[in-house]
Image (spheres, rainbow, N blue to C red):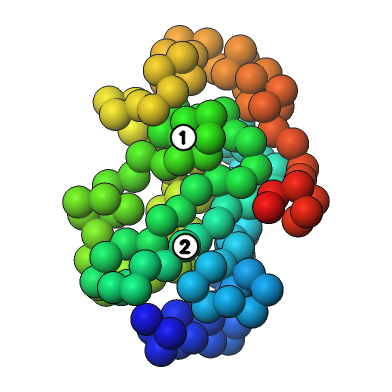
Amino acid sequence: MAMSSSGELMTLMTSPTPGVSAFPHNGDLTVWDGTIVGPADTPYSGLTLKLRFNFPARYPYVPPEVRFTTPIYHPNVDMKGRICLDILKDKWSAVLNVGSVLLSLQSLLGEPNNASPLNGQAAELWDTNMEEFKRNVLARHQDLTDEEME
């Protein structure tokens, strides 16, 4: 696992992708902190969202556990930050990596899978009342310090 994640870290550092980043938490290659900047033209535009990656011993053959540590209102994220995304479950492949997970999550912010919601109210509002959805996003979002994320 360590060789895989150290290679991914090098790739993320040498070829950064705009709007997403991830680094080991306190130097621990089995736990990473990620950041996604909310994409333009989405209810999350301009917001900074933090995530935590936990890598199991069998990574990259099994997916990392990923959750939002920033409170977020989204159809595919529950109130504890757990994420419903196929590539983090049954569609995982060893060719995927931290960067591809971050990009998929960034895309999910603008294109939720409302057919498989963890937050049914958010899914309904996304489809029926975008202004109310946006109000809920802003009401739920909090910028947390690193200490608050622990």
* Snapshot quadrant of residue 123: top left
- Amino acid carrying label 2: it is Asn
The residue that label 2 is drawn on is 54
Q: Is residue 91 above or below residue 41?
A: below
The label number, if any, that marks residue 110 in the structure image: none
Q: Are marks 2 and 1 in contact (CB under 8 Å)?
A: no
Residue 15: in sight, yes or no?
A: no
Residue 92 location (% of width, % of height): 24, 59
C-alpha separation, residue under disc 2 versus residue under disc 1:
17 Å
Residue 105 location (% of width, % of height): 46, 50
Residue shown at 55% from the left, 56% from the top: 52
Along the line of sight, the residue nearer the viewer: 82 or 138: 82
Q: Is residue 144 left or right of residue 29?
A: right
Along the line of sight, the residue nearer the viewer: 118 or 30: 30
Q: Is residue 115 above or below residue 1?
A: above
Residue shown at 52% from the left, 39% from the top: 81
Q: Is residue 21 above or below residue 139?
A: below
Of the residues tagged 2 and 1, which is closer to the observer? 2
Residue shown at 38% from the left, 62% from the top: 64
Q: Is residue 105 left or right of residue 17?
A: left
Q: Earlier in the sequence, mark 2 or mark 1?
A: 2
Mark 2 element type: strand
Mark 1 element type: loop
Along the line of sight, the residue nearer the viewer: 123 or 144: 144
Residue 108 location (% of width, % of height): 43, 43
Q: Is residue 37 left or right of residue 145?
A: left
Residues packed near mark 2 inside 10 Å, few (<14), some (14 to 19) or many (20 plus): some
* Snapshot quadrant of residue 76: top left
- Amino acid carrying label 1: it is Val
